[in-house]
Every structure is written in structure tokens, then in C-alpha cells.
Image (cartoon, helix red, strand yellow):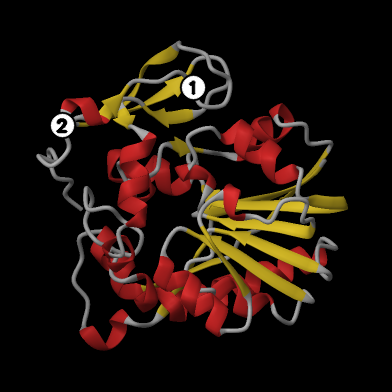
Amino acid sequence: MKQKSALPSWQKNDLESCACPVCQSEQHISGHVFEFPPFQVVRCANCQLWYLSPRLKESVMLDVYADPSYFAGGGDSGYADKDGHYRDQETALRPTFHAFLGQMQKAGIEGGSLLEIGTSYGFFLQEAASFFDTLSGTDFDAEAVKQVQALGFQGLRGGLEAIPEGEQYNCISSMSVIEHVYDPVAFVKTLSGHLSPEGWMVFATPKINGFWFKLMGKRWSSFKIPEHITYYDVDTLSYLFHQAGAKQLKVLPYPAAYPLGLIAAKLGMKIPNRLAGLNFWLPGTMFAIAAQF
């Protein structure tokens, strides 16, 4: 998969360099760098987190998320090749979410109220309806929120500020969102204030330093420049949770299905159209951690 060399619509004043978003160290490991001009992925010398620096300023990135065309690229702002419309991934996302909810259930995480951060069109909430009693979700996209509401769930437009003040939930989930967050420690701390006693916060995210990253290197599809600004493994996501005050963690399996056509495109292969829509389960692409505070 070829990456474009630059985005002329983004100017120098749209960019910023930053310290590590989790531990605030300004030192990164020499030689652990991936160049995506004008962006760069570096690795923190203190906590080992991979992160984007320079990156787009948060205000610029929020404008991208607010544009309805963002979802037309499958949640991809346009720097990398498109994944297709997010709706087109529904047949793979639904079994993925259902399988993961089964893993949550095995870990004793079910029942009561569920809040999903970054719910998009509510696919996860629909799959969660048989696992939880009440379901809510936030998203920046107005069309997505309307669909969530049409499904009978509480749809909240915006980020964390959209969560009703004082509202608490038995579970707060977030699938493929933490890698977008500019201040992840503050993000987790704020969400923990909306957890009921003994409640669980559950994050799933692409797995850097795993098999697929080592195989593909710079071509690793989850770099997704510029919207992914942090890249986690079990150690660094655990460190983030502890930095935010977590007292107990559980690492959960995250089985993930992908359309065969999407996998082939990522690998630069061509397959017959009749096979493109088939789901293929890929181990090790994602992982999840549940935390109590």
C-alpha cells in the first residue's frame, strides 16, 4: 500500500511537535523512527510508547472528524489509502464485536449500563444489547448519532463533554479510539469519574510490536497517519491505565474479522470480486484491556 508524500491542504502552522502523550518525556529512541512526511512516528525513551510527532494540532484534527466525509473513508482522513465506507465494514465488524462481547462476558463484564465512546453507527451497541440493560454512545458525527438514536439507544453528539454530568455507567467501552486521543491520561481520568463503583473501562486498540507490525514495518496498516497519534501494546496501554489511577487490569482477547478484499488491498494483492466480501479472522491485529479504578 503506497502512502502519499504530503497533503498540500495542511500547512506548517497546522502541525506541532510534542512530548510523549502518556509520560511527557521529550526523549525518543534513536533509530526507532518512521517517516511519513510531514509526519514522523517516534518511540518514547522512557515508557516505550510509539507516537506521532510532528502531528496535526488537535483543533485541525477535530475539524476532520466533524466532516461527514471522514466516515466515507472508513474512518480514514485521506493520507493513507481508503478502507472503504465504514458502513461497508458492517458485516465484519458485527461478528468481531459479538465475539469480543463474549470475551467480556467470560471476564464478568456484563449487565447494567454501557457507554461506548466513539460509537459511530452503533454496530457495537446493537451487538451489546443482549449483554447490557441500557446502552448509550457518543460520537462527533451528527448522522451517526441520529442513527444510534433511531436504533433506540441514547446518542450523544460530541466528545467527553457530551456525557451528562454526574452520570455513571457499569461499563465504558471504546473500540479503536484511544489511538486518536491527544491527552490520553486526562481522557482516562475523566472517564473513570463516570464509572460506577466496581465498574469496568474497556479499551481495544491495534497492537503495535506484534506479528503484523514486525512483518509489515512502515506498511503496517494501523499507522493511519495522521489520525492515529499513539500506538499501543499491552505494556504501554497498561502503563497508561496505571498513570490514570487504575487499580486492577485484565488483558482480554480481541478476535477480529476483516473482509478478504480489504486484507488483499493492504497486502497489494488482487482477488476475485466474489471473494472480496468474505470474512477472514486475523489473530494479533488488536488487543483489549479492561480496567477498574
- Circle 2: element type: loop
Farthest residue, direction right? 197
Amino acid at circle 1: Cys
- Measured from the top left, where is residue 89 in percent x and y? 39, 74
Residues 138 and 272: in front is 138
Q: Residue at x 79, y 51 (%)?
A: 195
Residues 169 and 21: in front is 169
Q: CA distance from mark 2 to mark 1?
A: 23 Å
Residues 225 and 222: in front is 225
Amino acid at circle 2: Gln
- Circle 1: element type: loop
Q: Earlier in the sequence, mark 2 or mark 1?
A: 2
Q: Does residue 187 appear anywhere in the picture?
A: yes
Is 22 drawn above or below residue 199 in the view shown?
Answer: above
Q: Left or right: 39 with respect to 195?
A: left
Q: Does residue 39 appear anywhere in the picture?
A: no
Q: Left or right: 161 with respect to 259?
A: right
Question: On the image, numbered disc 2 is attached to which residue?
Answer: 11
- Measured from the top left, where is residue 21 in percent x and y? 51, 26
Question: On the image, numbered disc 1 is attached to which residue?
Answer: 20
- Measured from the top left, where is residue 37 in percent x and y? 18, 31
Q: Left or right: 192 with respect to 262?
A: right
Q: Residue at x 22, y 53 (%)?
A: 78
Is 234 drawn above or below residue 262 in the view shown?
Answer: above
